[in-house]
Image: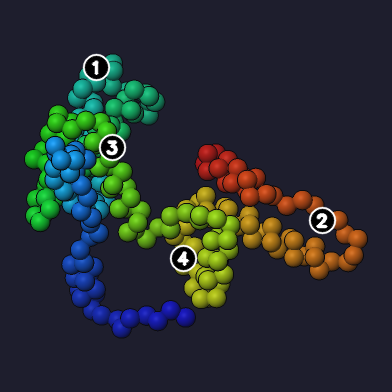
Amino acid sequence: MMNLPKEDKPGDIWARITSTPRPSQLVPFPRNDADGQPIAFVRLEVLTYNEQQQANAAAEAEVRTYLKGDAAPKKDENNAGYEYARREALQKHLLWRAAKKQEDPRPFFAQPNDIGQFLTPDEIGALVQHYLVLVQSTGPMFGSFESQEAMEAWAEAVARSGQFHPFALLSREDLTLLATSLASQRWNSAIASSSPGTSPEPTPTSSETSETAATSGAGS
C-alpha cells in the first residue's frame, strides 16, 4: 500500500503545488565566441499547459497572417505547406516563453520575432532539442524501455510493489510492447507445463513485437 501523506487543508495543498518551482535547466546558447566558448547561457523552463496553448495560438495567428487569401487553409482542410510553416513558427513562440535569463525570470529574448530574425534554423533547433530533453527527463511520463530486460525488470518491480498506477505513465507503444511480452511469457509458461509432445506455436520475436506496436500506433 502507498503511504499517503497527512491530509492538509485544500488551500494548503494548492499553495504547495503552485509554489513548487517548475523544472528548469541552464544550457549553453548554441553559438560560440572566438575562443570556442558559448557566448551566453540560457535557462529553459518547462511551460505550463496555458503557456503552451498560448504559443500554439500565436503560431497559428502568425502563419495565417503570412498566408493571406487562398493560401491560408480553410477549417478542417489539410495543407502541408501551412502545417510546416506553423510548426516552424511554433518553435519560435515556445522558445520565447521557455527561455529565461540566467539569473532573472524575464524572457531571454525580447520578443518572438527576434528569434527568427537573429538565430539560424540550426540554433533554434538546438534550443528546442534542449527543451524537449528537459521536458522528457523531468516530467512524470516514462520515457521508453531500453531493452527487453529493462521492461521485464520494470514490470517485476511494479508487481512486487502492488502499486499499479505507474502503468498510467507509459506511452501507448510501451503498453503494447509490455502486454505482448507478458502474453508471450504466459503462453510459453503454459506450454512448458503442458503434457509432453505438445508443439507450441511460435511466439513473436522482439522485432515482430516492435513492428506490431508501431503499426498499432500508426493506425490510431
Residue in front for this viewpoint, 30 or 178: 30
Of callouts 3 and 1, the N-terminal one: 1
C-alpha gap between disc 2 and disc 1: 64 Å
C-alpha gap between disc 2 and disc 3: 50 Å
Identified by mark 4, the residue type is Pro
Q: Which disc number belongs to residue 125?
A: 3
Per the image, the residue denoted by label 1 is: 69
Identified by mark 2, the residue type is Pro
Q: What secondary structure is found at the residue carrying circle 4? A: helix
Asked if disc 4 and disc 2 are in contact, CB closer than 8 Å, the reply is: no
- Coordinates of residue 190 in the picture (x, y in percent): 77, 65
Of callouts 4 and 1, the N-terminal one: 1
Asked if disc 3 and disc 4 are in contact, CB closer than 8 Å, the reply is: no
Of callouts 2 and 1, the N-terminal one: 1
Residue in view at x 32 percent, y 25 percent: 82
**Residue 77 vertical placement versus 109 (above, below):** above
Per the image, the residue denoted by label 2 is: 200
Q: Which disc number belongs to residue 166?
A: 4
Front position among marks 3 and 4 = 3
